[in-house]
Amino acid sequence: MKMINPLSRDPSPVQLPVLALLAILLLAWFTPNARAVISEPDNRVWGSIVLGTNIVSATQTNIVVEARRTLSSPPIASYRMGDSTAYGNFYSLAIPLESVNPISDPNATREGEQIVVLVHNGQFVRYLTLYSVGPRGKLVRLDLGDIDSDNNGLVDNWERQYFGAAGQNPNGDPDRDGVSNRNEMLGATNPLVPDARHPADTNPTNNIVSIEEVTAYALAWKTGKPWPVAPTNIPVDFVARAGFLWKNGERYIMDTNAIALGAPLWWTNVPPPQPSLAKANLAPANQKSVLVVKGVSDQPAKKSGASDSDQSKITRAFPEATSASGGLFVTLSVAPTSGVSAYVVEEKLPDGQSANQINNEGEFDISNGRVRWGPFFDAQPRELSYRLALPPGSASSGVLAGVASFDGWNVNIAGASVLVTPVELSRDPIQISAKGEMILSFRGLAGQPYEIEVSNDLQSWSRVTTITADQAGRLQFNENIDSSKRQLFYRARRREE
């Protein structure tokens, strides 16, 4: 059985009598302006393509292979991946070839002529090499792209170009710009020069943050969707910094003098704007609520370059009129300094709780349990609010933990933050035992300790005992009746560890 290589092109044979063929050759010999009219079999080049560490498949129809006389000249042969099902995941170029002068096809090459074979994706040249045209009818395999001989995720040519040898650490970051060697290679950036781009800068990646890019980045953050560029779980300060870069002129660089600050603060505009002293100091706020047992004032993490004399603030409070059975309204009062360009706010809820009635176009990210607002492209103070959705009779406890980011400077939310289910009276809260003791019954959180306190004036309270609620949340306290006192008040408070 005769086997036919699918990568070769069978030229249509010219069926001419021998005498006719001789006549044509003689005519060409005696006619000064005669041209070659019989094309010769092409020089066929085929093979696979490797870009980065991946073999290009037939499905990647944006990848095109071309043969050119020079890099800037038009193609003399071209193949788009997937054009022929017979070739599968290979490319195939039919390079025209003539050896009789003068040539009839302007694209025809000569045997031994050096041409350029390149791979592009319609926008950028991804790979190119020189090829010496082989004999007519020759089928040559020419694999294109770089090879990763040690399977470390870095192609050998790239490693040799920047480091002089293969075998580099793909997770290494020699220029300390937060981008690994592998991501530098995939992003076509220099691993030895700090030049990381902001993750929002993707469409296109050009050191310019447009409003469209900021909008897409912020929407993914607010809804909890993963971002295609690391960090895929978008941090709050990266969103604020993206807004800052857009607000101050869009074009930016990675400031090598700010590497110690880390991302995202090492990105600044070109030329840099006047520095905004957006870092905030947090003042405690003593707010009261039926669900609050104490106020928490978190101190912000200090970062070099921030000024304590000009600082933004954000404080959490619970309005007095709320109750556990109707849900809990939470307000966040934001007071940026005048120099702030953009800010965002994020509130983390206790596990298993949700939020609704969110104002100022905030979103609840159910997958991460966070309420998010912004970015706001100004320095206006705002009162943000949401409602903790607590079904009637449900228990609610835990700690609210929030952060605001002003131009990329993070500030923890101050004020009341600890929630606890209020102690409820049982159906028959007071009973008298056979011994004449008063029995008080409460309901709280299962397995949690509660302190029982007593007062005769609702002003001064003294501790009586500590009781731990059973698995059903029941609390029971026995007390001898003191007939000498006309009135006594008792309360149960969850003990703070």
Image: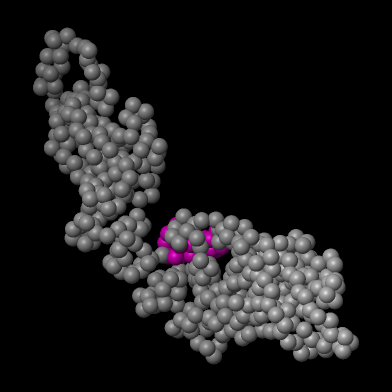
Image quadrant containing the C terminus: bottom right
Image coloring type:
one colour
Q: Position of residue 280 (x, y in %)?
A: 56, 83
Taking 481 as reference, is 59 above or below it? above
Q: Residue furthest front?
A: 435
Question: For the point 44% across and 65% down, which residue is it?
Answer: 198
Instruction: Report which quarter residue 10 is drawn in.
Output: top left
Q: Residue at x 68, y 62 (%)?
A: 471
The image quarter in which residue 207 lies: bottom left
The answer to whether one can see residue 430 in this image is no
Measuring from the top left, give residue 89's x and y in whole percent: 33, 34
Q: Residue at x 21, y 34 (%)?
A: 141
**Marker count (numbered):** 0
**Residue 199 among magenta residues:** yes
Is 298 situated left or right of 159 in this image?
Answer: right
Left or right position of 388 against 218: right
Where the N terminus falls, by quadrant? top left
**Looking at the picture, how far across and down is residue 258, in whole percent?**
39, 77
Give the magenta part as a residue range.
Answer: 198-218
In front of the other: 85 or 313: 313
In the image, 237 versus 201, the foreground residue is 237
Q: Quick one: 125 or 228, which is closer to the camera?
A: 228
